[in-house]
Every structure is written in C-alpha cells, then in structure tokens.
Amino acid sequence: MGWIIALIVVVVLVIIIGIYLWATYNSLVTLNVRVDEAWSDITVQLKRRADLLPNLIETVKGYAAHEKGVFEAVTKARAETLSAQGPAEASVAENHMQTALKSIFAVAEAYPQLQASQNFLQLQAELVDTEDKVQASRRFYNGGVRELNTKIKVFPNNVFAKRLGFTARDFFEVADLAAIAEPPRVQF
C-alpha cells in the first residue's frame, strides 16, 4: 500500500513539473516573439525615417548647396542606420543619426527662406512624428527585452532556459546619452 502512495506522489510531482515546464516554455516563446515583433517595429520606423531623409536633404540642398559636409554626414548616417544588424549596431547608428540631424537643422536655421518652405515644414513634421514613433517602439522593445531577460534569469527558469535555446537579448540603448538628452532644437 505504501508503494502505491509513493508512486502516486511521484506521478503527481512529474505531472506538476511537466505542466510547469510546458507553461514556462510557452511563456518564453511568447516573450521571444514579442521582442522580435518590437524589433521589427523599430526597424520599420528607422526605415521610414531613412526614407524621409533624401527629401529633406534635397529641400535643404536647394537653399544651402554649399553645406556639402552636412549632407554627406546625413547620407552616411542614413546608410549606417539601414545596414545596422541588431540593437548594438542600431544604437551606434542612432547616435550618428542624431548628430547628423542636429547639424542639418542647424544649417536650416541660417536660411529664413528654407524655414518658410512648406515642403521643409512638412518634412520636418513627418520627421518629428517618426522620431516619436522610434522612441515609442524603442520603449516597447526594451520592455519586452526586460520581461524576457527577467524570465530567463529567475530561478528555476535559469536552470533550463538556456538549454531550451533562450538567451538574454540586448536592450536598444543609445551609447552617447548626452547626444539625445535634448531633441534637436529647431526654431523657425
């Protein structure tokens, strides 16, 4: 009789551990997919911004053609953003992009005709909207990464999460916080 009770206890424990592993695995997969989706949202917004930049450059170039270095910096930052693979490269590209955008808006401040251009104002509004969406997407991504990384690192998940193929993900952080402490200031 005692061995039947022991067998039942062992079977119940195996079932509880199995349910726990099944539920934990499914939640890790869900969080992993959520992080992938959030990264996709970031890349969509970065691509949208990159698509706006040639029009912005052409508009500013019409008024300030002699500012070749600024245009080259923006073009280089755009290419770097489009070729970034993963959060680490994207954050380096983001720093360069912020610096380049500040310089192009600094050039624009010197040209009152440009500041009055409807095309420039519309492009600027779309760029500001896109920057807001990049920041929102970044917060969503980093929140998903935080949840996933926490789930992977807490006990007892840390015992088997890595064996199941789950690894901690990188946050999308900006390396130079001073570069983004304030958004580019544009006064017209």
Image: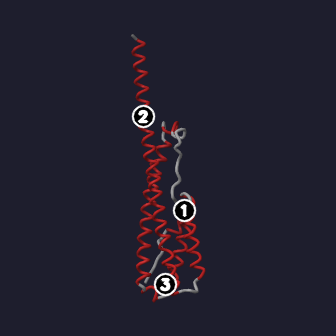
Count residues near mark 2 (Cα–Cα under 10 Å), then give few for <14, some for 14-19, many for 20+: few
Image location (x, y in percent) of residue 103: 54, 78
Question: Mark 1 or mark 3: which comes first in sequence?
Answer: 1
The disc label shown at residue 109, or none: 3
Image location (x, y in percent) of residue 116: 42, 86
Q: How many labels does the image show?
A: 3
* Residue at the (44%, 81%) spot, across then down: 120
Cα distance in 3D space between marks 2 and 3: 60 Å
Is 5 situated above or below 167?
A: above
The residue under label 2 is 20
Count residues near mark 1 (Cα–Cα under 10 Å), then give few for <14, some for 14-19, many for 20+: some
Is 32 situated above or below 111?
A: above
The disc label shown at residue 91, or none: 1
Q: Which label lies toward us, 2 or 3?
A: 2
Kind of residue at disc 1: Ser
Rendering quarter of residue 122: bottom left
Kind of residue at disc 2: Tyr
Is 173 situated above or below 62?
A: above
